[in-house]
Amino acid sequence: MKRLLLGSIALVMIVLALAGGGKSTSSSSATTKDLTYNGQTYTVPKDPQKIAVLSNSVLSMLYAVDGKAISRVSTTDSLPPEIEALPVLGQTANINMEQLLGLNPDLVLGLENQHKKYESQLQSSKIPTVLINYDGIKDNVPLIKFLGALTNHEDKATTLANTYESNVNKVKDAVKSQQPARVAVLRATGKGVTAETDAAITASMVKDLGMTNVVSAHLDKTTTDKTVPYSLETLAADNPDIIFVVTMGKEEEITKAMEKAMTDNPAWANLKAVQNNRVVYLPSKLFLLNPGLQTPEAMARLVQEAYGIDVTF
């Protein structure tokens, strides 16, 4: 009997050992995971099901990797029906926190420069929050891969990132043999005109495409400003082949005002780009803010305007 009891105990111990003995160290039992984006590590739910997104640019990428969300922010842009139907949390820079908390999200995705002010409230509500720096086009591929890892759709994200990079390289390859166009990238608002530096979206694409931004010659190389003052006298002295104009505000009104100035003011009228009808007004949707997955299309638009080369994907 004693021998039988000992044998039974030994059998139970073997079964427990094979089953892990109650010591749970496998990743399958974890409820969170650590992910890194642009050098910052975030602890997030292992399989988030209720992601509240505070930026539509991030939201579009989330859906591109087959992720899902429970919110969006207001916009005048057309959206896919699935995204259009999501609850609206106000404007990107002015989130309705009562409504956000009422959705009971298991993760909030936002932008560092827009939503830092809400971080403490989200932390006190014990809601995991990821506030990312998503600004220049260099952030697009890292964000695609981060969102793929976040939603456990790494394969989809890898395919998407590869297609994105292939399309960008296709645009760059199309102009490798071209004499670099001399361009100025102007930012026009209701209050006046400034010039973009390489830190701004359109000027950064111009640089990546090998064009010469005439404004760069006047800049301190350490500047991080996206726009700088740029007088008409300096523009006349630089006399670029092409002037790209990015509008910020009421696009139609700003365009009409600039066109009138170019007609009425001899300083504008004498510019080579004006005389040759090479002043190009670019849509703010693609050129004011990061166009995200549409970056290859935006770069192709610049190539077509500068060199007359059509790049299709």
Image: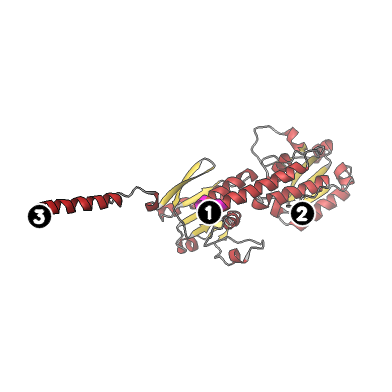
Q: Which mark is residue 1?
A: 3
Number of marks: 3
Q: Residue at x 89, y 45 (%)?
A: 275
The kind of residue tagged 1 is: His
Say which of marks 3 and 1 sits in front: 3
| Range of residues picked out in magenta | 149-155
Say which of marks 1 and 2 sits in front: 1
| Gap between marks 2 and 3 measured at Cα | 97 Å
The kind of residue tagged 3 is: Met
For disc 1, the marked residue is: 153
Q: Residue at x 50, y 58 (%)?
A: 51
Secondary structure state at the residue bearing disc 3: loop
| Gap between marks 1 and 2 measured at Cα | 43 Å
For disc 2, the marked residue is: 254
The kind of residue tagged 2 is: Ile
* 128, 150: nearer the viewer: 150
Quarter of the image where one finds residue 81: bottom right
- Residue 298 is left or right of residue 58, and the answer is right
Secondary structure state at the residue bearing disc 1: loop
Say which of marks 2 and 3 sits in front: 3
- Residue 129 is left or right of residue 60, and the answer is left
Pinpoint residue 65: horizontal percent, then vertical percent.
57, 55
